[in-house]
Image (cartoon, helix red, strand yellow):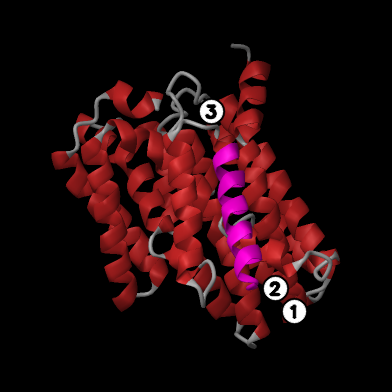
Amino acid sequence: MRAEIFTLILGMAAVTYIPRAIPAVLTDKLRFRAKVEKYLKLIPFTAMAALVFPAIFSVDESRPYIGVIGGLAAVLLAWRKLPLAVTVLGSIGAVLTVYLISGAA
Amino acid sequence: MTRKQQYLCGIKSGVPVIFGFIPVGIAYGIMAEQAGLLAGETVAMSVFVFAGASQMMAVGMYGQGAGLASMILAALILNLRHLIMSTCVMNRMKPCGTGFKLLAAFGVTDESFALFTTEQESRATPWYFLGLITVTYTSWVTGSFLGAIAATLLPSILSASLGIALYAMFIGLMIPGVKQNLRLGLLVVLTAVVNSALSQVIPFSWALILSTLLCAGVGVFFVNLDEEEVEEG
C-alpha cells in the first residue's frame, strides 16, 4: 500500500469512528428527560426522510422518474406489510423493468 | 431470548441491507479502481473506515487530485450525522459496558441505525445490534472486494437498477410507523421538503444534519408518539 493512501485511510478511519464513538462514552452518564427521549425517537424518521429526499430523484442523474418509480414501488410494497427484503427487491425489479422497457441505461 | 438467539435475530434483520450494500460496495469498488486505487487499498479502506458515502466521496476527490486534508475534512463533515445516530443507538444500550459500546459504535451506519431504532424495543437488544452489524459490515467489505476485482463484469442495466436499493430500504422502514400515525407522516413530508429546500442553498451533508435536527425538534411539539403506534409497525 502506498504511504499516501495509508495516511488517507488512517485519517478517514479516525474522523469516521470518533463521531460514532463519542455517544458510546457519554450516554452512560446521561439520563434523558421525556422530551429529549421523544426527540431521539423522532430522529430516525426525520433522518431517513432527509436521506431519501431529495437524493432519490438523482438515483439516475438524467432521469428523475427512475427514483420516483422505484420509490413508489417501495411505498406500495411496504404499505402492504411485505417483508423489508421483498420491498427492496420489488423496488429494484420495478426500476429494472422500466430500464428494460425504455431501453435506457 | 439468549444472547445467541438475539444475535441470530439481528443477523436475520440485516438481510435486506445485503441487497443494498453489495451493489453500493461494487459501485464504490468500481469508482476506486477508476480513481487509481489498487484493489488492496480499496478493500482496506472499507475494512477500516466502513462509511459508504465518505469513501465514495474520498475516491471521487482522489481521482480529481484532491489533497489529503480536504478529503479527510469532507469525510468528517459527512460523518457528523453519525454523532446523532449513534446517540440514538447508544440510548438503547444503557446496560452495556463501555467496551461493548465502543465495538458497537464502529457499526453505526445510516442503515444499522435505521433498522435498530425502528425495531420494537423488546427485540432491539445490544446482541441484536451486533448480529445486525456483522451482516452490514460483511456485505460492505464483500461488495467493495467484488467491485475492486470485477468492475467490468456486471451488466450496466443491473448496476443502474441497484442504485434504488438503499432508498427502498429507508422507505420500507418508514412506512409502518407513518401508516399508523398521520402526524408522523406529516413530519416525514415536512423533513423531505425542508431538506430538499436546504440542499439548494447549503452543502447536502449540512442540509441533512440541519433538517434532521430541526424537524425532529418541531415534531416533539406536534407528533403524538404513542409507543405502540410507532414501535409495532
Q: Give amino acid for label 2.
A: Met
Depth order, front residue of B163/B97: B163
* x and y, in percent, of residue B157 in the image: 69, 66
Q: Tell whether position A96 is magenta.
A: yes
Q: Which residue lies furthest to the front in this view?
A: A101
Q: Which residue lies furthest to the left in this view?
A: B221
Mark 2 and mark 3: Cα distance apart in space:
39 Å
Compared across the picture, whether B109 is left or right of B193 comes to right
Query: Mark 1 — residue?
Result: B34
Q: What element carries label 3?
A: loop
Q: Is the magenta stretch mostly helix, strand or loop?
A: helix
Query: Mark 3 — residue?
Result: B97
The residue mark sitting in front, 2 or 3, is 2
Few, some or many C-alpha atoms within 10 Å of disc 2 (few <14, some 14-19, many ≥20)?
A: many
Compared across the picture, whether A20 is left or right of B135 comes to left
Asked if the residues shown at circle 2 and circle 1 are in contact, with their CB atoms under 8 angstroms apart, the answer is yes
Question: What is the number of the mark on residue B31?
Answer: 2
- Quadrant of the image containing the N terminus of chain B: top right
Count of marks overlaid on the render: 3
Mark 2 and mark 1: Cα distance apart in space:
5 Å
Instruction: Identify the subunit bearing mark 2.
Output: B
Q: Is residue B174 above or below residue B210?
A: above
Q: What element carries label 1?
A: helix
Residue at figure coordinates x 24%, y 47% from the top left: B187
Depth order, front residue of B45/B21: B21
Q: Tell whether position A31 is magenta.
A: no
Q: Is residue B211 above or below residue B92?
A: below
The residue segment tinted magenta is A86-105
Residues beneath discs 2 and 3 located on the same chain: yes
Q: In this view, does B194 lie above or below A104?
A: above
